[in-house]
Amino acid sequence: MRFQGKTILVTGAAGGIGRNITTAFEAEGARIAVTDLDTKGIEAEVAFDGDLTDRVFCDALPQMVKDKMGSLDIVINNAGITRDNLVLRMKQSEWEDVIQANLTAAFKLSQACVKAMIRRRWGRIINISSIVGRIGNAGQANYAASKAGVTGMTKALAAEVASRNITVNCVAPGFIVTPMTDVLEDSQKEALLSAIPVGRLGEPEDVAACVSFLASTEAAYITGQTVHVNGGMAMI
Ligand code: NAD
């Protein structure tokens, strides 16, 4: 029960990875607040439907959680989208939508929640980036840029708040079995499998286990890092 007495907010909680993160923290005693475009069917003490690219919603969210639950100790920036296209064909809107949802929203929410964490002298922010932010991927210039951006932002914020007992880290999944990867064709999945030494795609539980370790008290001396959960696909 490592998270007894702690309150956590998980974004993108209706998705494959978000649901598992929520379940993992609940099993260890955390009080759970979730947010997504539609939170119907998610088990949580408090759920907020909203679009994180709406800056007003993003700014207000931490206070809304605190009003309902008393505090906000751990924030998981997990919501994300893809709008894949080759650079030559990528529309301005495909670029902007991905940067807004994956990078700007994570920045805004981190900015909105960190002040109270500084006051309480404890906090954990964990951003879900991606292997693609590190090694790139054809057709994903927008997604790769957003996830590499999240890594840089994580390091800068980590340096700003480390002395206040707040750690900020990234978890970078490889290819995980979720609705986001369900769209891949069988031939793409076979090609991927041959590049993954562990011999399988990742499960959302593999990611959730890493997130909960980074949120724990045991991980107090780890900050500004990116932990790769990719079955050995890229040994970085
Ligand atoms: P998913 O599509 O199942 O879940 C993403 C969730 O984010 C969805 O429920 C969606 O509604 C929510 N969301 C998207 N935009 C939002 C917005 N503007 N406001 C509020 N909610 C929004 O995908 P997933 O695989 O569970 O992905 C979770 C995170 O992990 C993402 O950041 C993704 O980039 C990252 N990731 C996934 C994989 C993978 O293989 N599945 C690999 C690397 C990184």
Image (cartoon, helix red, strand yellow):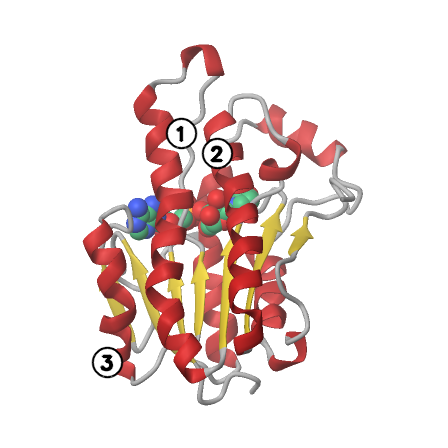
Quarter of the image with the C terminus is top right
On screen, residue 70 versus residue 181, left or right, reads left
Numbered disc 3: secondary structure: helix
x, y percent for residue 81: 40, 40
Numbered disc 1: secondary structure: loop
For the image, the number of numbered tags is 3
The answer to which of 114 and 184 lies nearer the viewer is: 114
x, y percent for residue 37: 26, 52
Q: Earlier in the sequence, mark 2 or mark 1?
A: 1
Q: Amino acid at mark 2?
A: Tyr
Spatial CA span between label 2 and label 1 = 8 Å
Q: Amino acid at mark 1?
A: Arg
On screen, residue 30 versus residue 132, left or right, reads left
Q: Earlier in the sequence, mark 1 or mark 3?
A: 3
x, y percent for residue 188: 61, 26
**Label at residue 143:** 2
Residue 126's place in the image compared with 74, above or below, is above
For the question of whether residue 11 can be seen, the reply is yes
Mark 2 residue CB less than 8 A from any atom of ligand 1: yes
Q: Amino acid at mark 3?
A: Lys
Q: Residue at x 30, y 25 (%)?
A: 93
Q: Residues within 10 Å of mark 3 (few under 14, many from 20)?
A: few
Q: Residues within 10 Å of mark 1 (few under 14, many from 20)?
A: some
Residues tagged 3 and 2 counted as in contact (Cβ below 8 A): no
**Label at residue 83:** 1
Q: Where is mark 3, residue-wise?
A: 68
Q: Residue at x 22, y 48 (%)?
A: 54
For the question of whether residue 177 can be seen, the reply is no
Numbered disc 2: secondary structure: helix
Spatial CA span between label 3 and label 2 = 34 Å
